[in-house]
Image: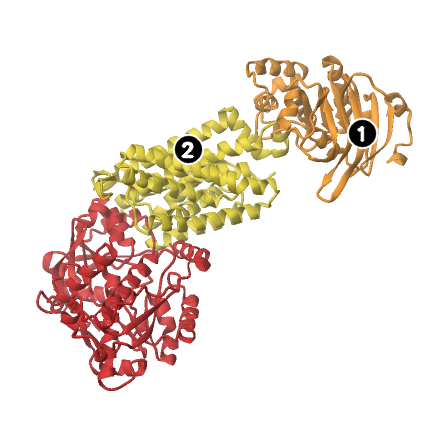
Amino acid sequence: MNFDLVAQLAISGLVIGSLYALLGVSFGLVYQTSKIFHLAGAIPFAAAGYAAVWAAKSLQLSIWLSIFIGLAAAVIIGVLILVLGYFPLIKKKATLLSLFLISLGLSVAFPNLLQIVFGVDNLPLEVYDAEGNPAVPFANPTYASGFLTITKLNIVQVVSSWLLVIAVLYTIKKTALGRSITALRTNPAMASAVGINNKVVYLVVFSVSSFLMGVAGILITLQFVANPTMGLQWTLIGFIAVFFGGITSLGGSALGGLILGLLSSLSGIWLGSQYAPIVTFAILFLTLLIRPQGLFGKEAI
Amino acid sequence: MKLQNMKRKWIAATLASGLLVSAFSGISATSANAAPSTCINKIFGAGGKAAGQGVTINAGMLLAMTGAGSFFGDVMSKGAKLAAEQIKAAGGFNYKIQIADHKNGDVPTALTEVKRMVSQGKIKVLQTSYGAPSEAIAPIIAANKVLTLNGGGSSPGQLKKDYLWQNRMLFGEDPTAGALAWIHKKYPTAKKLAIIGTQENGVGAQTTTAPNAWKKLTGGTIVATETHDVGATDFTAMASKIKASEADAIITYSFGNDPGYQVKAFRQANITAPIMGIEFTSQAQEVAGASYDTFTFATDFYNVANPNPWNKCYVAAFKAKYGEDPEYYGSNYYEQVFIYWELVKRVIAKGGNPNDSKQLQAALKANPTFNSVYGGDAKKVGQASFLLSDHSISKPMGVFTVKNGKPVLTQGIVKVAASADPNSALK
Amino acid sequence: MKTTNLILNASNINGGYGKHQVLRDVNINVGAGEIVGICGHNGAGKTTLLKSIFGIQPLTSGEVVFKDKDVTGFNTSKVTALGMSFTPSDRPLFRDLTIVENLQLGAHIVKDRSLIADRIAEVMEIFPILAERRNLLAGRLSGGQQRQLSLGMALMVQPSVMLLDEPSLGISPAVVEKTFEIIKDLAARKGMSVLLVEQNVRAMVKITDRVYVLRNGEIVLEESGDDSRKRTDWWQLF
């Protein structure tokens, strides 16, 4: 076996797995609290990328300010989905299925909206000149050590993903907000009895989740481009990470994402690249078959 | 991954009712007796009755108007609309366009839409696009005698079909010999080749044509064969494997955005081997950014800067109308309207009925060579010929390098038989 | 029967789920320091009545007055802040959190967070077992201990009225009596009122000052604790 190749694939897997972990925590947070299968999490993901490119292109802002605007857009649109989309349905005691269908509908319609407003072009996030033409590409040097390479952005992706994951896990574990989320997740009736306002918790959870989605969207836009369908593919993998790692455990979702990334990348030692998505789904299938509660999940009580 | 396709279908489905475009071309009623002497007349002759003035032909277009491929539908319809306007202004026939949406290649939709255009829209000619829907509609157009041209998405399955003609080189297959011969000429020591592609398009080129040609040219080996799903974005794992294979050169049959993602990932992984592709889109260039300046591709690429007089006339008109340069797909659909015009003129000259597709196809078979915005030079309009044996086309091709994001022709190439010396593809 | 110093008065309560009416013109009240029991068959509407008073279950008509204030339609955090606590029958705590965290959550609506440590200490004094196991997950406690914890959580808001839904549920018969003793003791010690719903009538009437019997959503009997303790024909009433 070629050791260099294995090590390089592990690096790729770590990078992609870190992003999956971030997405897994974002999705898991919403799912655990509200039981909503929040497919529309793809929207803040794409919105962050597009808003950042728009700010860089139309407002001539620096990359950092553009990223800030992208993240703000992600949070705003995530909260709007909750307030205008889910709240009215929850109030009418809609089933989780109808909430999911709304989510699905939104996540399908949004790329079309992006396409109508911004066109079908791939939009890179970089510094633009006054005419809106790309002027200074985003600098992303490659660091090499012998055979092994990693880019600066890859390092940023890994570090920022895990910092955020740890921050969220710490908040859940150690703060009053985290306890409220755990309370609402594990026993909504009792949460209501002790006076926890679930609307407030939902608002906080959706803001945080959309922020994480936004960060992922920005990191992907920096690596590639913003395009209308960028959100769905990534968020679907985030969902798989959650079910793989364990729906009852946020830390499990994060580790599930990491392992998923490593496995799909390392499968390249034996399998062609076209099998990577199949590996991902096969892992999910086997997990659901052998350990339905997920790798790190608890058995249903 | 397949998700990409699923996504496209979802997207298409949601927009179905709202955006089902059945637009008619916005041809303004130019007065017929104005004596036009446009650049079109200089190349195609005077207008008037013999040039089809007063003849209206109902023309269908089957395009991707919604979904991820709506870019293609947009530029294709732009090219055809411009041609129809120019021809009418030059005193030619009235090419009356109706556009149907195959929703980014959805076959059942394509079948329904073509049947509808035939029965209700009374179309006599059709410009189609994409591989799968065009293969699927072949029996309908043959049964109803609708002379059909495909300028975007040729595939072996569309060959030798009555009333169906390809105005685009066969994807991957045709430029392979020239592409590899060029690599061999430029990098004579290269022996190890990596081949990348998808299982959707150009499979024969990946598995047979390219390996055979490479061995003939260099006596070398194929060190890596990688396939991926259409629409994949993460090529870091593939980059690791290509790098570990120590390939001296890479040829990729991926299309759409995918080569852009590949080149970016490969260069970031410090892979320095030359990468040859078989198409160029500005979309992929946007994805890859500056790294695309290390990309080379071989195809029947449409060259905006081609000094061929018809092309200059075309580019100027396109810019005036749409405010941007024409590109590859729009140009094929522009050209195709002129092919129909030429056929109408021939049928009229013989005293026939230009609204009879059978007569139009007979005129095509009688002389399958037409003017082209490809090839030629500053003094001479280019020419392309349909092959009567299989209804494919032979157009001037080239190897292009990318400079500052724009393709530059570096070597003309031609299609050669599989048995021939690949070096003979270099013109 | 008239009670002076009413702390809670629910009048003409009608309510239910969708078209299914569960409560019909129910009138009940609780005096200051009083322990009031509600008994009745499964499905008589006991739990719905408690939830309606606490504001979890919306009313179709009727009025709930708590400490001379009309609290009809208030959300649970407001009602809790006024001094009413509600302990559901099923899983009245958070199994995945520690005992301390559960108590902290019990005081969720307490704005002055500096009070919380003192109150936890106070609860732990009443229930020493909770102090011993303060960092244990609540799900690991025995049934009786879980009941103690749920009472402790209710105490965290220093309620004037505790609403208890079937406090005997899920604990062994041996502990039931002790639990009711604790409730009685707490009410006396804190000057609290208690409104409790219970299937285990025999255990309940040992501590109640007054009892209502609910049948098919209607109050069919109201009598004093002494009278109810003499009664032997409970089943006929249901």
Outermost residue on the left side: it is B379
Give the image location of residue B215, x and y in percent: 17, 64
Q: Colour of chain A?
A: yellow
Q: Is residue A275 left or right of residue A185?
A: left
Mark 2: few, some, or many residues within 10 Å (few <14, many ≥20)?
many
For image coordinates 71% across by 32% down, the residue present is C52
The residue pinned by badge 2 equals A165
Give the image location of residue A209, x and y in percent: 45, 36
For image coordinates 46% across by 59% down, the residue present is B17
Q: Which of the 4 quarters of the picture holds residue C98? A: top right
- Could you tell me which secondary element the residue under label 1 belongs to? strand
Q: As shown in the figure, which amino acid type bears the numbered disc 2?
A: Val
Q: Colour of chain C?
A: orange
User: Could one spot residue B292 in this view of the protein?
Assistant: yes
How many discs mark residues in the rendered view? 2
Q: Is residue A214 left or right of residue B326?
A: right
Same chain shared by disc 2 and disc 1 = no
For image coordinates 84% across by 31% down, the residue present is C213
Mark drawn on residue C27: 1
Front-most of residues C135 and C89: C89
Q: Colour of chain B?
A: red
Front-most of residues C64 and B312: B312
Mark 1: few, some, or many residues within 10 Å (few <14, many ≥20)?
some
Tag 2 near tag 1, CB within 8 Å: no
Of circles 2 and 1, which is in front? 1
